[in-house]
C-alpha cells in the first residue's frame, strides 16, 4: 500500500483572498487535504497535535485530537471520491476552530447510542467537549463541520 501524505492547501478567506494572519497574531490558519481512507484519520490527528504544540496550545491537544478524529472518521465513512479538508484556525484570541470538509451533502446527526452500541457516540463526544459549540455549513459540493474549543488565554502579542 502506498504511503499517505498530507497535501497542504492554500487557505482562502470569505472574500476569495488568501488568508493572512491578523496583525500581531502568531498563528496562521492551517489546512491539509487528505484522501478518504481510514489512515487519513491518524494523519489528521498528527496534523492537529503538531499545529497546537507549535501554537503553544498544549492544553487543548487531547480534546482537539478526539474531535478531529471523530469528524475525520465521519468524513471517511461518507465514501466520497474526492479529498477531505482538515483545518484549524483561531477565529478569535479565545477560540480554536477545527474544521473537516467532505464531499457529502448528508448532514451529521447526533444520536443516542445505547450502552451496547459499537458506534454512534462521536458527535455526542464532540458536543460535550465543545460545550455545544459545533455546527455544519452546507456547501454546493458537500459540507464543512466545525467544532470550537475555548482557549485558556489569548494569543500573546
Image (spheres, rainbow, N blue to C red):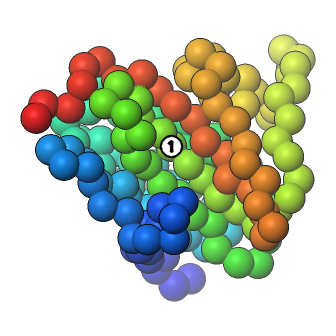
List the single residue furthest toward the left.
157
List the single residue furthest toward the front.
15
Q: Nearer the viewer, residue 24 or 79?
A: 24
Give percent across and percent down for residue 50: 29, 50
Q: Is residue 23 above or below residue 64?
A: below
> Horizontally, is 42 left or right of 83 in the view?
left
Per the image, label 1 sits on a secondary structure element best described as strand
Give percent across and percent down for residue 35: 61, 73
Q: Residue at x 42, y 22 (%)?
A: 150
Q: Nearer the viewer, residue 156 or 33?
A: 156
User: Residue 102: which quarter of the image?
Assistant: bottom right
Q: Residue at x 24, y 25 (%)?
A: 154
Residue under numbered circle 1: 98
Q: Residue at x 37, y 58 (%)?
A: 30
Q: Is the N terminus in the top left, top right, bottom left or bottom right quadrant?
A: bottom right
> Horizontally, is 12 left or right of 104 in the view?
left
Q: Dot 1 surroundings within 10 Å: few (below 14), some, or many (20 or more)? A: many
> Horizontally, is 74 left or right of 25 in the view?
right
Q: Nearer the viewer, residue 153 or 67?
A: 153
Give percent across and percent down for residue 53: 23, 41
The answer, for residue 77, to whether it is visible in the render is no
Q: Nearer the viewer, residue 35 or 27?
A: 27
Give percent across and percent down for residue 96: 41, 35
Q: Residue at x 73, y 43 (%)?
A: 136
Q: Is the C terminus in the top left, top right, bottom left or bottom right quadrant?
A: top left
The answer, for residue 87, to whether it is visible in the render is yes
Amino acid at each position: 500500500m502506498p504511503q499517505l501524505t498530507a497535501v497542504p492547501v492554500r487557505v482562502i478567506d470569505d472574500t476569495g483572498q488568501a488568508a493572512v494572519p491578523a496583525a500581531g497574531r502568531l498563528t496562521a490558519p492551517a489546512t491539509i487535504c487528505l484522501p478518504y481512507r481510514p489512515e487519513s484519520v491518524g494523519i489528521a490527528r498528527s496534523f492537529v497535535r503538531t499545529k497546537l504544540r507549535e501554537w503553544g496550545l498544549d492544553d487543548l491537544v487531547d480534546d482537539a485530537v478526539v474531535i478531529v478524529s471523530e469528524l475525520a472518521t465521519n468524513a471517511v465513512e461518507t465514501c466520497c471520491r474526492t479529498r477531505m479538508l482538515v483545518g484549524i484556525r483561531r477565529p478569535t484570541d479565545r477560540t480554536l476552530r477545527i474544521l473537516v470538509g467532505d464531499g457529502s451533502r448528508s448532514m451529521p446527526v447526533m444520536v443516542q447510542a445505547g450502552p451496547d452500541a459499537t458506534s454512534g457516540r462521536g458527535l455526542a463526544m464532540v458536543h460535550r467537549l465543545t460545550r455545544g459549540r459545533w455546527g455544519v455549513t452546507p456547501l454546493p459540493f458537500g459540507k464543512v463541520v466545525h467544532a470550537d474549543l475555548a482557549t485558556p488565554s489569548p494569543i500573546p502579542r
